[in-house]
């Protein structure tokens, strides 16, 4: 991403420079010196060209719209865009076409409220109609629900909303009364609401500063930006003040004892796991750490959990021995007369199978090891280096 900046002042009309985004504070100052060499107080900055991941933003940021922007605001917006998913950027592009936002403050705030404008997973009139009926958006007597044509209901709602379907969601443009994370003065948390596996709070060594939150894994450019904000030469010169993780099973204290390289590797491991399998990861972590002294757990144990999901059989719907016993009987394919089924002790059957498999019940259902080969990171020192590539 980049923007071409130009001075809005008669004496500096032809002076311009390119600023690559997100930029460090030093890079922004250097760009300002180029287009405002005499440090004029009546100086304003215009964007004459830009290259952004959302093309619709160019109409709002380009100087032809008559808007003046502070470089720090443009830079913050660019950094915020890096934390949006492709789907969120698609939603934002559609919303911008409607003219919902027109100034930098509202553009920044829009990135924090994209979910308010979308109904995820609803991509046709049938689904929209079903949603409207089941949520009570359209009131229907219970005795008439089965006779409702959901497709017609969805079509009616879509026409009324003047909205449309995108690939993964229904986008609704309404006059919502939303909070303003950015008040025009103080920038909010740039990562707020982003689905980031691991966030690390860094601060300079022996400093009383609050520090800054960074996502893992870090790109080289993000490292440079972090060093600029922290005032350190190298990212390793900063200390870890806190760690936050979307995976609840990871012990925060264990993560805080790890170094940045280890956390970076763990974050990359999580990124490679489909989010639909995160529930299995939670179950695996609980399976492997139940009854284990937290002081003996190392971040490498978490690598093992993430790298070996295929070595476990996970049944999230199974919560009791009887349920597992019944499942085992059903999957065995044995036909048992209905009369005989009444006399089967499914609890005893389930308990016996669980004991043989050395399985466990977790907060995420039943889980046990299978026959797939288990790969232990601790037995291969090159694994972490390979993960970094």
Image (tube, grey):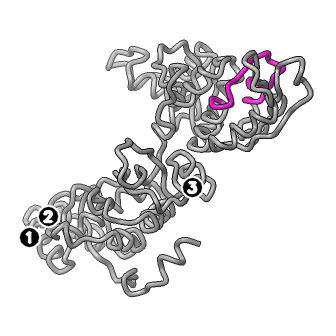
* Left or right of 85, for residue 284: left
Q: Residue furthest front?
A: 38
Helix, strand or loop under label 1: helix
As drawn, 197 above or below 95:
below
**Position of residue 343 measured from the top left corner of the image (x, y, whole percent):** 7, 65
Q: Quadrant of the C terminus?
A: bottom right
Identified at 38% across, 56% down, the residue is 240
**Position of residue 2 measured from the top left corner of the image (x, y, whole percent):** 76, 41
Q: In the image, is residue 13 part of the stretch drawn in magenta?
A: no
* Left or right of 79, for residue 5: right
Foreground mark, 1 or 3? 3
Q: Quadrant of the N terminus?
A: top right
Helix, strand or loop under label 3: helix
> What range of the chain is rendered magenta?
57-73
Identified at 58% across, 35% down, the residue is 123
Residue that label 2 marks: 321
Give the mark, 1 or 3, whose residue is nearer the N terminus: 3
**Position of residue 180 measured from the top left corner of the image (x, y, whole percent):** 48, 20
As drawn, 247 above or below 77:
below
Q: CA distance from mark 1 to mark 2?
A: 7 Å
Q: CA distance from mark 1 to mark 3?
A: 56 Å
**Position of residue 273 measured from the top left corner of the image (x, y, whole percent):** 47, 62
Residue that label 1 marks: 348
Residue that label 3 marks: 223
Q: Please report contact status of discs 1 and 2: CB closer than 8 Å, yes or no.
A: yes
């Amino acid at each position: 991403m980049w923007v071409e900046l130009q001075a809005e002042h008669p004496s500096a009309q032809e002076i311009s420079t390119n600023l690559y985004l997100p930029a460090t504070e030093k890079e922004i100052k250097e760009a300002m010196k180029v287009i405002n060499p005499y440090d004029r107080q009546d100086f304003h900055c215009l964007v004459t060209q830009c290259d952004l991941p959302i093309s619709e933003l160019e109409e709002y940021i380009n100087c032809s719209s008559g808007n003046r922007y502070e470089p720090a605001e443009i830079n913050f917006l660019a950094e915020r865009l890096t934390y949006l998913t492709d789907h969120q950027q698609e939603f934002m592009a559609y919303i911008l076409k409607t003219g919902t936002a027109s100034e930098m403050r509202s553009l920044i705030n829009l990135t924090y409220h994209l979910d308010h404008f979308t109904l995820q997973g609803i991509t046709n009139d049938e689904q929209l109609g079903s949603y409207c009926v089941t949520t009570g958006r359209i009131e229907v007597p219970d005795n008439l629900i089965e006779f409702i044509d959901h497709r017609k209901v969805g079509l009616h709602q879509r026409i009324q909303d003047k909205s449309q379907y995108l690939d993964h969601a229904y986008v609704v443009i309404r006059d919502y009364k939303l909070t303003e994370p950015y008040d025009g003065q103080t920038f909010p948390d740039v990562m707020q609401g982003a689905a980031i596996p691991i966030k690390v709070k860094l601060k300079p060594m022996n400093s009383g500063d609050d520090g800054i939150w960074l996502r893992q894994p870090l790109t080289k450019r993000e490292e440079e930006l972090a060093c600029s904000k922290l005032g350190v030469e190298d990212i390793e010169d900063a200390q870890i003040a806190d760690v936050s993780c979307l995976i609840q099973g990871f012990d925060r204290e264990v993560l805080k004892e790890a170094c940045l390289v280890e956390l970076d590797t763990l974050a990359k491991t999580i990124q490679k796991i489909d989010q639909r399998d995160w529930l299995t990861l939670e179950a695996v972590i609980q399976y492997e750490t139940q009854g284990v002294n937290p002081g003996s757990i190392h971040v490498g144990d978490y690598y093992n959990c993430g790298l070996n999901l295929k070595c476990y059989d996970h049944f999230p719907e199974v919560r009791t021995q009887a349920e597992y016993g019944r499942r085992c009987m059903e999957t065995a394919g044995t036909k048992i007369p209905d009369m005989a089924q009444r006399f089967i002790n499914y609890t005893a059957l389930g308990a016996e199978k669980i004991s043989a498999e050395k399985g466990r019940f977790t907060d995420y259902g039943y889980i046990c090891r299978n026959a797939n080969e288990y790969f232990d990171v601790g037995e291969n020192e090159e694994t972490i280096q390979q993960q970094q590539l």
